[in-house]
Image (cartoon, rainbow, N blue to C red):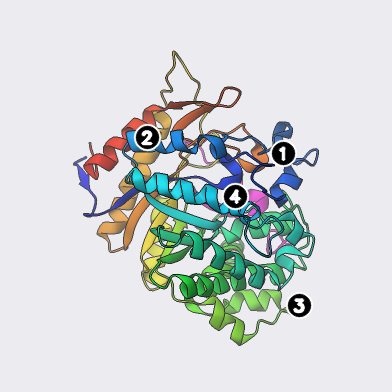
Amino acid sequence: MTELQFPEGFVWGAATAAYQIEGGAHEGGRGESIWDRFSHTPGKVSHGDTGDVACDHFHRYAGDVAMMRELGLGAYRFSVAWPRVQPSGKGPPHPAGLDFYSRLVDALLEAGIAPMATLYHWDLPQALQDEGGFASRDVAGWFADYAGVVARALGDRLRWIVTLNEPQIFGLFGYVVGTHAPGVQDFVGYPRVAHHINLAHGEAVRAVRAERARLPVGIAMQTPPMHPRSASAEDAAAARRFDAFFNRYFLDPVLLGAYPPELLELLSPLGVRYPEEDLAVIAQPLDFVGVNNYTRYFVRHHPETPLLEALADEHHRIDGARYTDMGWEIRPDALGEVLDRLRADYGNPVVYVTENGAAFADPVADGQVHDADRVAFLRGYLARLHRAIADGARVRGYFVWSWLDNFEWAHGYSKRFGLVHVDYPTQRRTPKDSARWYAEVARRNALSP
């Protein structure tokens, strides 16, 4: 292997999300979110864990930024907690909430770290969920108002802004499967939810541009490759169906201005109709597309669940393959497939890899964390990323998930994705070997042999 040099100006960053790291759940006027309610509901989260304290980033952000600077991070993707800015999801912003993010952004800029803000990383104000959440068409207006507030307050200092994080995940697992907040199980209502998610994105893009016309705006998608479980024609057809239902439900209207015909045919028994004027709002031109990728999905035909086939097969394992602590197959080609698809089918947009990383056990030994498995994971995925760029993908930066170990949603604190180990009882931060390795990659702008 020779040294793989990345393009000049390539951005090297790391990512987090508000509910997963901030804590301070009842401070600064913050309102209740759907993840507060969900995590406090018995049986919903492993070990009864909640994000009440998490990594206490709300109080420790200055030290966290100093550590980012020390390790040479070039950019930081964080999310803004909607209920911290608008406790009820509507109305005037809470000054203390905006002040926290203003101080964070200023600290990042002072440290020479470019800030990327995500407007929605799954923490809908509970008050809005009580009014229907994403099942209500009103959510598009609520979200646009909130987007305008954040853009007005922070947009002069942000480098990029992202509307939604992984609509595929929070939509399906929050409103159909029910294993994520708000814990709804309503397949019949999902086509309405998915459309309102898309509409909220489009309205938010318009709101951001009305406030900050020059601020680059995009969306972060998780669109894993869908591979048939077997060589059968039935499994191949199932993979195409689930790709339309999971991936193209969001990719196509956002990037192409239309829902896939195959999807509309599948949903026709539900009487689904989407107004053309809505599609014009959804398909706002974007400055970039965020790609979140970890692995691929396997799909096999299930006659009784023709649109949820992959979910029953997500833990399928292959002999000889390697897996992370989440049970996800380590497959760098999965990232390459997504980038190749965007290039071939969606006009080759400017891309930032907004999440990519792996969970491993990561024990601390003599004050150090030797996470060779994570280094190997990142090396493999970055090598595949380099190849995609050489093939013409317009990738401008990479954000590893995650900067800190954190609250991993329904898994609680049992999974560790961070470059930095967090001892939750003491909040002690310990950079892992992967943090120093990644810092060297960023410094050299190259992947060494």
Mark 1 Cα shell of 10 Å, populated few (<14), some (14-19), many (≥20): many
Q: Which residue position is annotated with label 2?
A: 376
The amino acid beneath tag 2 is Ala
Q: Which residue position is annotated with label 3?
A: 269
Q: Which mark is residue 23?
A: none
Where's residue 205, x and y in %?
51, 71
Q: Which residue position is annotated with label 4?
A: 96
Residue at disc 2, secondary structure: helix
The amino acid beneath tag 1 is Val
CA–CA distance between discs 2 and 1? 30 Å
Q: Earlier in the sequence, mark 3 or mark 2?
A: 3
Q: Is residue 414 left or right of residue 209?
A: right
Where's residue 101, x and y in %?
51, 50
Q: Which residue position is annotated with label 1?
A: 45
Q: Residue at x 44, y 13 (%)?
A: 366
- Badge 2 vs badge 1, beta-carbon distance below 8 Å: no
